[in-house]
Image (cartoon, rainbow, N blue to C red):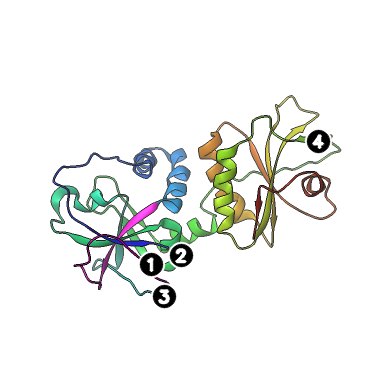
């Protein structure tokens, strides 16, 4: 799942920002609209966590075996420091010696440490405190406000087909998301147009999911926004029995994601 490593301070100063997560952190500091992008990247990018209790003489990388116990460094106030890059550990020269760390995807870290408080980049000009409720909302998707739903209140002719330009990057990103959601069985893609409107066709994703899909559509919507843009429309619906749109996906298309 993750890798241990030892990091020795670089002799040269790195430039902030040095990755996409750090760029989104800067934007989110002054732009409310950019916060969904930041939260999405925080969830799916690797974060750096300081560790203690293992042999620091082991240079290089080694795999973190299943059931391995790891102790994270914790500040006196109970917060766990995490970093957007290894260079952030040494910002402002507060940490001067080599330190052991673990690189782990944000979602995995927050899932393993439910109830914990974090401080992101504690030694940098750009950082953030992350409280337990915020982490819980991030994991269940309720922190994302970009939810899309179709509501048809009258008889309307709906035109469905496959998109002229297949969104490969979006499909790959959504497949990665769904693979981490055990209640998602399959997902389908199409282009949809309401015949009584002048709006052009837009993408629609149908998800075969057990139970409520609000948290999944929230996460999926936030990811889609980063790929297709804020001004583009994408709808997420749940596959349901005796539903004409669902029948199209089940009978006339192939799933782009299928749980194995």
In the displayed structure image, the side of residue 232 where residue 64 appears, left or right: left
Crowd rating for badge 3 (residues with CA inside 10 Å; few <14, some 14–19, many 20+): few
Residue 243 position within the rendered picture, expressed as x and y whole percent measured from the top left: 83, 49
Whether residue 74 is visible here, answered yes or no, is: no
Element class at badge 1: loop
Q: Earlier in the sequence, mark 2 or mark 3?
A: 3
Q: Is residue 200 above or below residue 30?
A: above
Residue carrying label 1 = 116
In the displayed structure image, the side of residue 8 where residue 3 appears, left or right: right
Q: Which residues are magenta?
A: 46-66
* Residue at 27% over, 66% down: 51
Whether residue 220 is visible here, answered yes or no, is: yes
Residue 123 position within the rendered picture, expressed as x and y whole percent measured from the top left: 22, 52
* Residue at 30% over, 64% down: 79
Q: Earlier in the sequence, mark 1 or mark 2?
A: 2
* Residue at 47% over, 48% down: 40
Would you say the residues marked 1 and 2 are in contact, meaning their CB atoms lie under 8 Å apart? no
Residue carrying label 3 = 67
Residue 177 position within the rendered picture, expressed as x and y whole percent measured from the top left: 55, 52
């Amino acid at each position: 799942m993750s890798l241990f490593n030892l990091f020795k301070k670089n002799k040269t100063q790195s430039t902030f920002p040095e990755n996409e997560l750090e760029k989104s952190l800067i934007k989110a500091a002054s732009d409310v609209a950019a916060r969904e992008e930041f939260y999405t990247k925080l969830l799916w990018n690797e974060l750096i966590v300081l560790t203690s209790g293992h042999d620091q003489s082991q240079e290089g990388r080694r795999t973190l075996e299943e059931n391995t116990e790891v102790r994270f460094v914790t500040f006196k106030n109970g917060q766990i420091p995490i970093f957007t890059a290894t260079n952030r550990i040494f910002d402002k020269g507060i940490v001067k010696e080599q330190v052991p760390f673990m690189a782990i995807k944000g979602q995995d870290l927050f899932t393993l440490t439910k109830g914990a408080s974090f401080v992101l980049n504690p030694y940098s000009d750009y950082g953030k405190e992350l409280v337990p409720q915020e982490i819980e909302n991030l994991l269940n998707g309720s922190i994302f406000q970009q939810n899309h739903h179709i509501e048809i209140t009258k008889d309307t002719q709906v035109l469905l087909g496959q998109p002229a330009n297949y969104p490969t990057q979006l499909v790959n990103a959504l497949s990665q998301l769904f693979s981490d959601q055990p209640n998602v069985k399959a997902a389908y893609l199409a282009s949809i147009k309401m015949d009584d409107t002048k709006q052009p066709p837009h993408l629609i994703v149908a998800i075969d999911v057990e139970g409520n899909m609000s948290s999944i559509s929230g996460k999926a919507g936030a990811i889609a926004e980063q790929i297709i843009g804020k001004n583009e429309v994408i709808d997420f619906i749940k596959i349901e029995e005796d539903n004409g749109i669902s029948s199209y996906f089940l009978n006339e298309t192939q799933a782009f994601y299928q749980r194995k």
